[in-house]
């Protein structure tokens, strides 16, 4: 199985320091849906691993989160693309869970669900916490400049040997390029 793991906010859709709290605020980044469809056509199973602390903070509920993911599913279908499954952490930072990135709990859930080791699996994110979660399970972290990516790049800490791409589409260009 060829698996790729994507962060959500800032990679697939626009991000906000005030959180994406409603279906209307869930707006795909240009080219991201087509990029996911290209991954599918290239034989990749696409999973999403996303912190959604807005739930734990009381900014939106699980039904709203589900509606956002339904919107993603419908928009991807229009591109002949799909995300196989969304793994999310609904906890706030104060909950001390093990699924909130940078901890590897979501990655372990993905490995268990697909019954595969994540060694070398591409994990595409826009923040250091995405990259650290990938490293914790031996996956291959890839940084995009969208979302919080430019801030992450400007901090330049923890980015040793991490490939950096303009956006998800550019990352996918590299992943599906013939060897």
Image (cartoon, helix red, strand yellow):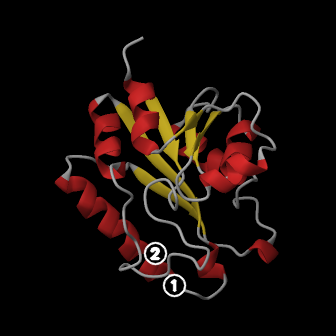
At horizontal 66% and vertical 46% (from top left) the residue drawn is 108
- Give the left or right position of residue 66, taking residue 98 as reference: left
- The picture places residue 122, in percent across and down from the top left corner, at 55, 33
At horizontal 55% and vertical 72% (from top left) the residue drawn is 16
55 to 165, vertically: above or below: below
Residue annotated with mark 2:
65
Q: Secondary structure at mark 2?
A: helix
Badge 2: few (under 14), some or many (20 or more) residues near its Cα, within 10 Å?
A: many
Residue 12, picture quadrant: bottom left
Q: Single out the residue that lies furthest toward the bottom.
A: 58
At horizontal 51% and vertical 84% (from top left) the residue drawn is 61
Q: Single out the residue that lies furthest toward the front.
A: 154
Quadrant housing the C terminus = top left
Q: Secondary structure at mark 1?
A: loop
Residue 2, picture quadrant: top left
The foreground one among 75 and 87 is 75
Q: Is residue 104 visible?
A: no
- Give the left or right position of residue 70, taking residue 163 as reference: left
The foreground one among 116 and 9 is 9
- The picture places residue 35, in percent across and down from the top left corner, at 34, 42
- Give the left or right position of residue 91, taking residue 52 as reference: right
Marks 2 and 1 sit apart, C-alpha to C-alpha, by 6 Å
Residue 41, picture quadrant: top left
Residue annotated with mark 1:
61
Dots 2, 1 in contact, CB < 8 A: yes
At horizontal 26% and vertical 47% (from top left) the residue drawn is 81
- The picture places residue 79, in percent across and down from the top left corner, at 20, 50
Quadrant housing the N terminus = top left
């Amino acid at each position: 199985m060829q698996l790729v793991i994507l962060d959500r906010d800032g990679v697939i859709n626009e991000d906000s320091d005030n959180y994406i709290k409603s279906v209307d605020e869930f707006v795909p980044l240009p080219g991201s849906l087509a990029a996911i469809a290209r991954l599918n056509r290239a034989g990749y199973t696409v999973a999403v691993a996303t912190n959604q602390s807005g739930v734990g903070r009381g900014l939106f509920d699980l039904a709203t989160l589900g509606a956002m993911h339904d919107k993603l599913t419908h928009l991807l279908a229009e591109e002949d693309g799909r995300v196989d499954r969304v793994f999310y952490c609904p906890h706030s930072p104060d909950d001390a869970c093990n699924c909130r990135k940078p901890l590897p709990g979501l990655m372990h859930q993905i490995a268990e669900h697909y019954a595969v080791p994540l060694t070398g699996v591409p994990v595409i994110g826009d923040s250091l916490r995405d990259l650290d979660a990938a490293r914790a399970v031996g996956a291959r972290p890839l940084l995009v400049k969208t979302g919080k990516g430019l801030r992450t790049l400007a901090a330049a800490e923890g980015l040793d040997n991490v490939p950096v791409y303009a956006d998800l589409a550019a990352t996918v260009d590299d992943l599906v390029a013939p060897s």
